[in-house]
Image: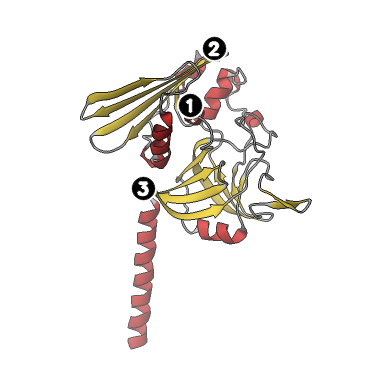
Amino acid sequence: MFKGLLYTLLIIIILILNNVKALSAENLYLVFDKAFYRLEIKEKGEILQSFEAGYGLKSSLFKTKKGDFLTPEGIYKIKSIRPSQSYFYFVELSYPNENDLSWAYFRKELKPENTSKLDHLGNNIGIHGGGPAKIEKGKRDLNWTQGCIALSNKDLKTLLSYLKPGQKVFLINSSKPLFEILKKLAYPVRVKPLDFWEGELYLKINNETYWYFHVLEKASGLKILTFKEWIKGRLNKNLISHPDGTLENEKNLKEIFLKNLHLVIEPKYLKREYLWK
């Protein structure tokens, strides 16, 4: 009888721990920074785990098509988690996202009549095992994948215990200027093919402070970044960039922004009407 009670108590403890873990996972998100080859599990800006990770070709260019071997940048979600014969496990991400589609529309590669045919943008982008690096001519090559993010099988096993479908994954390159980072994180609001692309991004810093970024890029090369800060409903800051997208003293703003990616407010709905103009 005592053994039965002990076994029941053990099961209850396991269930409680699993529920706590599931609730905790609601606040977890991933950040992969190409500049440092690091994949981090974070909660409210704090790093819980950090792993060395490889990715695709090292380039300042953004991923735009299938077969370019580039790893995308932007805000994605975990679509599925499944075993992989070649790479231990595969964590599929929601690439291409709305931002990727809008930039394809800007480049006039996407038309209203063929929006379901997105093969040219690439797919099956995710996180897998197989090692962060491959040995090439006696040297470690961290840029060996076809666009995915690669970890050691041991690190991936640790990572999987934190993951579930729907979690956010931020893919960034912190070595880029703030404008270039934001253009792939912002949500599209107005796009005209081969003319201009406009996007917005909101952050709720706390109950009193909100940040707003507006990104405008024209085919002519003009880049305008606008930053506004509201405190208690009043406009506290209003900064407009130079024509190349750089803000005065943007280093500090960029640093604070990257530490607070989790505060990005996801729009309740996406205005895909811009695609059909």
Cα–Cα span, label 1 and label 2: 18 Å
Disc with the residue nearer the chain's start (1 vs 3) = 3
Residue 215, compared with residue 85, is above or below; it is above
Q: Amino acid at mark 3?
A: Lys
Question: Percent x, y for residue 271?
Answer: 43, 23
Cα–Cα span, label 1 and label 3: 24 Å
Residue 77, compared with residue 160, is above or below; it is above
Q: Amino acid at mark 1?
A: Phe
Q: What is the residue that sits farthest to the right in this orientation?
A: 137
Question: Percent x, y for residue 209?
Answer: 26, 33
Depth check: 57 or 162 in front? 57
Check disc 1: other Cα within 10 Å, few if <14, some if 14-19, many if 20+.
many
Disc with the residue nearer the chain's start (3 vs 2) = 3
**Residue beneath disc 3:** 44
Residue at left offset 41%, top offset 39%: 261
Q: How is the image coloured?
A: secondary structure
Q: Are marks 1 and 2 in contact (CB under 8 Å)?
A: no
Asked where in the image residue 114 lies, by quadrant, the reply is top right
Residue 177, compared with residue 128, is above or below; it is above
Left-right relation of 50 to 264: right
Check disc 3: other Cα within 10 Å, few if <14, some if 14-19, many if 20+.
few
Residue at left offset 58%, top offset 36%: 72
Question: Percent x, y for residue 55?
Answer: 63, 44
Depth check: 190 or 164 in front? 190
Mark 1: which secondary structure?
Answer: helix
Residue at left offset 35%, top offset 33%: 203
